[in-house]
Each structure stands twice: as structure tokens, then as C-alpha cells.
Image (cartoon, rainbow, N blue to C red):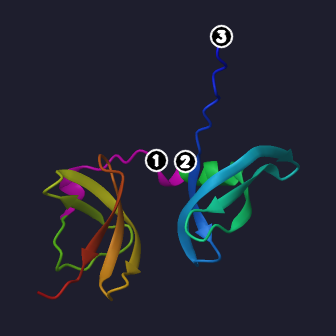
């Protein structure tokens, strides 16, 4: 009888990388270790391949807060338009996706455009352009 090879599935987390100076995708490497500060595990950045020791308990608690269920009605939302300017905490309705979300962050793209990161009910987290001059 042939031995079955164990398939190891990689687990990924999105955390801040001090090497890239923004949040990037990291692959968890090895096994978690219990310490007095919580469960610690090495994470390798998929972009730079740099390793950092992360606290899994802190990461999981942060994910739970940011990915919470949104209970927002369309009546409370502003219709999304690329020419409008939005603030963190604004509630947006995207007519193409027929989805409602809340603005979590604002950024500037590499092309100098303003963008917002919106946590939607159906479509998870999306980056949208704002305040574009047409």
C-alpha cells in the first residue's frame, strides 16, 4: 500500500510589513509556539521574503473587529460616485454591485489618485477611487 503524502496548506495573513512599510500578505511558517505573551509564529512576507515573529492571538482579535458583520441599510448610505469626496466612517451604496459598505481608510495611489478602502456587506473589502476630476 502506497503512503499518502501529507498536503500542507499554507495559511496567509495580511499584516503590516516594516520592510515595505504597508500591509502585505504573509505566509505563516512552521508551527505556533505558546508563550506568556500568546501564540507566536513566524510569518514570511510574500513580496520581500523577510520574516517576522507575529502574535496570532492579536492578529485574530484584530480580524474579528474589522471583519464584523455590517448591518447598514441603503437609506443611510450615500450613492458612490467617482467624483465625490468621502470621509472615514461614511456609508456608501455602490449601485453596480448593489452593495452597502463603510469607508475604513483613505489612501493615495501610486498614480497620485485618491482612493478609499470600503468594507462592503457582500463584496468584502474593496478599494475605490474618489475625488477624480473628469
Location of the C terminus by quadrant is bottom left
Residue placed at 18% from the left, 53% from the top? 97
Task: Estimate how packed mark 3 is, as few (under 14), some (14 to 19) or many (20 or more) residues with alpha carbons within 10 Å.
Answer: few
Camera-near label (3 vs 1) is 3
Specify start and end residues of the magenta stretch as a single range.
Answer: 64-78
Query: How many angstroms separate mark 2 from mark 3 (CA)?
Result: 44 Å
Q: Which of the 4 image quadrants contains residue 83?
A: bottom left
* Residue located 13% across and 57% down the image: 95
Q: Nearer the viewer, residue 86 or 26?
A: 26
Q: How many neighbours does mark 1 have within 10 angstroms: few (below 14), some (14-19), or many (20 or more)?
A: few
Does residue 77 lie above or below 5 as drawn?
below
For residue 85, side relative to residue 105 (left or right): left
- Name the mark on residue 11: none
Identify the residue under disc 1.
Answer: 68
Corner quadrant of residue 93: bottom left
**75 magenta-colored:** yes
118 left or right of 42 in image: left
Rounded to the nearest angstrom, the CA distance separating label 3 from label 1 is 47 Å
Q: Residue 108, located in which quarter of the rendered image?
A: bottom left
**Disc nearer the start of the sequence (2/3):** 3
The residue tagged 3 is: 1
- Tell me if residue 21 comes above or below residue 25 in the rendering: below
Pointers 2 and 1 in contact (C-beta within 8 Å): yes
Residue 114 position within the rendered picture, expressed as x and y whole percent measured from the top left: 31, 82
Q: Name the residue under label 2.
A: 64
Query: What residue is shown at x 65% (from left), y 29% (from top)?
Result: 6
The image quadrant where one finds the N terminus is top right
Of helix, strand and loop, which one carries label 2?
helix
Amino acid at each position: 500500500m502506497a503512503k499518502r503524502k501529507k498536503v500542507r496548506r499554507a495559511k496567509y495573513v495580511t499584516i503590516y510589513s516594516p520592510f515595505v512599510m504597508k500591509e502585505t500578505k504573509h505566509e505563516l511558517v512552521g508551527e505556533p509556539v505558546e508563550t506568556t505573551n500568546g501564540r507566536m509564529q513566524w510569518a514570511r512576507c510574500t513580496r520581500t521574503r523577510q520574516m517576522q515573529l507575529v502574535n496570532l492571538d492579536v492578529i485574530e482579535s484584530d480580524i474579528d473587529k474589522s471583519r464584523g458583520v455590517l448591518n447598514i441599510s441603503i437609506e443611510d448610505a450615500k450613492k458612490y460616485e467617482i467624483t465625490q469626496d468621502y470621509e472615514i466612517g461614511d456609508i456608501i451604496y455602490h449601485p453596480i454591485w448593489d452593495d452597502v459598505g463603510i469607508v475604513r481608510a483613505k489612501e493615495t495611489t501610486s498614480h497620485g489618485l485618491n482612493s478609499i478602502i470600503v468594507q462592503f456587506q457582500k463584496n468584502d473589502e474593496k478599494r475605490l477611487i474618489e475625488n477624480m476630476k473628469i
